[in-house]
Amino acid sequence: MTLDPRDVDDLLATIPAALEPLKADWLRLMELAVWGDLASGRLGATGRFRKRLLEVGEGLAGLARPRDWIPHPRERLKGALGASIKLRDQLELLRRAAAAVDRGADQARLHAELALFANQLEETLTPLERQLAERLDRLHQAGREADADEDDA
C-alpha cells in the first residue's frame, strides 16, 4: 500500500482554503486588539495578548504556505502536521494571555470573538490533523511492508 505523492499534494492544497475564513476572523480580532478599548489590571498584559495574537496569525500563515518545495511527500506531511500542532500550542498561549485582558469597553466583545475563533480553529485543525496523520501512517505501513518484502527475498 503506497501513497501517491499527488494524494499528499491534493490534501495539502486544501489547507489554504480551509484556513481562509479563519484568516478573516483573525484580522477582525487583530483590529480589535490594536484599536479596541482594552485594558488590564496587570502591567503589560494587553501587549502580551497582542503578541500572542500575532503569533497565532503567523501560525495560520505558516500552515497555509505551500510545501511543494519539500522533495519528499513524507516530509511535506510532517511539516504540515507540525505546523498544525504548533498552532494549537500558540492558541493555548493566546487564551492564557487573553484571560488577563479584563477591562475596557471592548473586553466582552474580544472574549466572545476569541472564543468563536478558537472553536472554529480547533474544528478546522482536528480533521486536518487526522488526515495528515492517516497519510503519514500509510507511508509508515508501506515502508514496513517494503522492509518485510526485502527480508522475505
Image: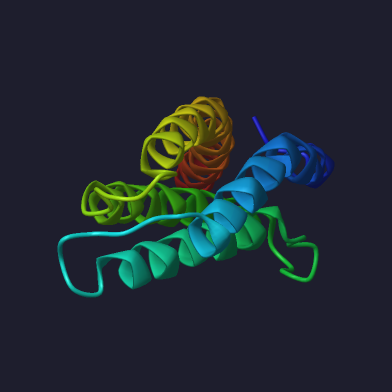
Give x and y (percent) for residue 150.
53, 48
Q: Quadrant of the C terminus?
A: top right
Q: Residue 47, how many percent across, how many down? A: 36, 72
Q: Is residue 65 left or right of residue 130?
A: right
Residue appearing at x 66%, y 52% in the figure: 27
- Count the labels in the image: 0
Q: Quadrant of the N terminus?
A: top right
Q: Which colour scheme appears in the figure?
A: rainbow
Q: Is residue 89 left or right of residue 109?
A: left
Q: Position of residue 136 (x, y in %)?
A: 53, 42
Image-based side of 66 in relation to 99, left or right:
right
Q: Hey, which residue is sitting farthest left in the picture?
A: 42
Rendered position, 112 above or below 23: above
Q: Residue furthest front?
A: 105
Quarter occupied by residue 124: top right
Task: Identify the residue at image location x=21%, y=54%.
Answer: 100
Toward the viewer: 38 or 93? 38
Could you say which is closer to the camera, residue 61 or residue 109?
A: 109
In this orientation, which residue lies closer to the viewer: 45 or 69?
A: 45
91 vs 75: above or below: above
| Residue 57 vertical position relative to residue 130 in the rendered view, above or below | below
Q: Would residue 112 be visible to someone looking at this image?
A: yes
Q: Residue at 66% of width from left, 60% of height from top?
A: 61
User: x, y percentage for residue 20?
Assistant: 75, 41
Residue plotted at (56% across, 61% down): 35
Can residue 79 be seen here? The reply is no
Residue 130, above or below 71: above
